Image (cartoon, rainbow, N blue to C red):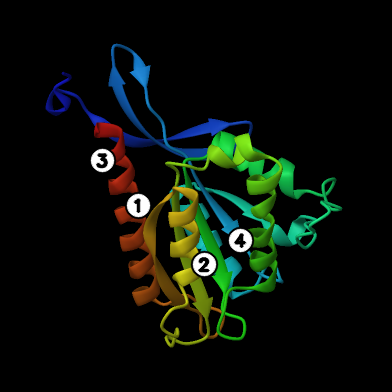
Amino acid sequence: MIDFTKHTIECFDVKEQNISHRFCSFDVNNNLTMTRTVIIQASSRSNGDTGRIVEYMVSKYQFDKIDLQTKTIGHYDYEYKNKDDDFIGLITDMINNYDTIIFATPVYWYSMSGILKVFFDRISDLLRVHKETGRKLRGKRMAMISCSNSDDLIAGFNMPFYESANYLGMHYLGDIHTYVKDNRLNEAIMGKIDQFVQYIEDYNVERVRN
């Protein structure tokens, strides 16, 4: 049995092909266990309020970002007519390269954005066709950040995320609601984000220990 109290677990940044990555590592006999986090930005505009939230996290914590607005992802089709769009390649890369996935979505009509709902619908491709890829989601971590113009998120907004994570065998780390006024993040929102990120990183460190 390894005595983890005799070793140091830390988070650090690595520069790789001009992209910064945040890792948590545990070094035992020169072996490293690493965790990577990616934010999936799911707004109909790349530079809106949700984008401001995401950019704050990316610049401060060096998380990677994937902007769904820049991808071509068709609606779920029972005949698999969209097999050649960006979805399978994108989610395969996500599964192979990241342990923690944070979804960032604006609140549209009391729900997640349409672009994100299409993304979730397409996960069905991993249940019906790309089953081996889908099984690799088990044990990964999911979190969610919502964004609007006020602090008024309706109860149950997080249900699709929580239940989807549970169904896929992922660990749901929780969620926070943020809001942007006058195109700025106030101190309270930045503090809320910082606390949430700290919780996620602490969870990842505990996972490395165990």
| First along the sequence among labels 1 and 3 | 1
Foreground residue among 205 and 165: 165
Identify the amino acid type marked 4: Gln
Mark 2 vs 4, N-terminal side: 4
Mark 1 → mark 3, Cα distance in angstroms: 10 Å
Residue type beneath disc 2: Ile
The reply to whether callout 2 and callout 4 are in contact (CB within 8 Å) is no
Going from the N terminus, do you reach mark 2 or mark 3 first?
Answer: 2
Gap between marks 2 and 4, in whole Å?
A: 10 Å
Q: Amino acid at mark 3?
A: Glu
- Which disc, if any, is residue 53? 2
Picture residue at 70% right of the left edge, 49% below the top:
125
The residue located at (71%, 42%) in the rendering is 129
Nearer the observer, 170 or 106: 170
Residue at 30% across, 33% down: 208
Mark pair 1, 4: CA separation: 18 Å
Which residue has dot 1 on it? 200
Instruction: Work out whether mark 1 precedes mark 2 in sequence or the reverse, and give the earlier one.
Output: 2
Q: Amino acid at mark 1?
A: Ile
